[in-house]
Image: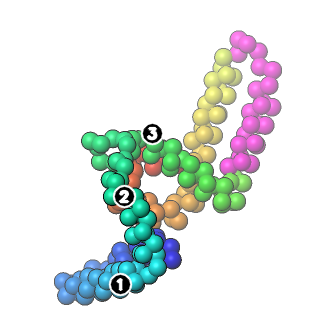
Amino acid sequence: MCQDHILDIINTTSGEEAGADDEKEKLAARQKTVDTLSEHYSSSSLATEMAGKIARGGGAPLPEVEGNATGRYATNWCTQFFVLFGRTLKLKFRDPMSFGTVLSSVIVVAILEGSIYYDMPMGDWTNRIAAVSMFISFMSFLCFDILMLWPTERTVYLRDQRAGMYCTSAFYVAR
């Protein structure tokens, strides 16, 4: 069973306001679910296998996480950015509509700008400024394809943010 699915079952919350008694019932139901999952795991062959692997380690301490030891996160901002950027690329490649729109818009604008500003004279600085401003405006509109991915990514972002995996600025810059 997927580990994320188990976490989603345990950490479910409803969007409606509930009274104190209703909240206690929900907590009791969650605790019962956690206890049931723990009992099934402890009696499974996986628990025995994992205990054997831990014992083979000879009781050596686990390696410490390298990174920003004084900060809130285990890794520095650059590492967070590169991991999130890689995840964004994978998401874009998996969504053919998003990938197709980005790829086609880049090709169309490249051909358009190339045909307009091809063989521009060296002293024509106003056309060069126009080319740069057209490129900047294109780049600013290129990020709108992220809007299609945000609803599916929102739950993952909120869960990761609560777990303290990365800072918000690294997430948005990597997008």
**Residue numbers of the magenta segment:** 102-124
**Residue 115 quadrant:** top right
Residue linked to disc 1: 39
- Bin the neighbour count of mark 3 within 10 Å (Cα to Cα): few under 14, some 14-19, many 20 and up: few
| Amino acid of disc 2 | Gly
Considering the numbered disc 3 on the image, is that residue within a helix, a strand or a loop? Answer: helix
Front disc: 2 or 3 = 2
Identify which residue is drawn at 77% across, 31% down.
Answer: 114
Query: Considering depth in this image, is 117 or 54 the residue closer to the camera?
Result: 54
Q: In terms of sequence position, does the residue under pointer 2 or pointer 1 come before the other?
A: 1
Q: Are marks 2 and 3 in contact (CB under 8 Å)?
A: no
Residue 28 highlighted magenta (yes or no): no
**Residue 96 quadrant:** bottom right
Front disc: 3 or 1 = 1
Q: In terms of sequence position, does the residue under pointer 3 or pointer 1 come before the other?
A: 1
Front disc: 2 or 1 = 2
Q: In terms of sequence position, does the residue under pointer 2 or pointer 3 come before the other?
A: 2
Residue linked to disc 2: 58
- Bin the neighbour count of mark 1 within 10 Å (Cα to Cα): few under 14, some 14-19, many 20 and up: few
Considering the numbered disc 1 on the image, is that residue within a helix, a strand or a loop? Answer: helix
Q: Position of residue 174 (x, y in %)?
A: 50, 46
| Amino acid of disc 3 | Cys
- Whole-angstrom CA distance, mark 2 to mark 3, is 35 Å
Query: Considering depth in this image, is 113 or 172 the residue closer to the camera?
Result: 172
Query: Considering depth in this image, is 75 or 37 the residue closer to the camera?
Result: 37
Q: Position of residue 59 (x, y in %)?
A: 33, 58
| Amino acid of disc 1 | Glu
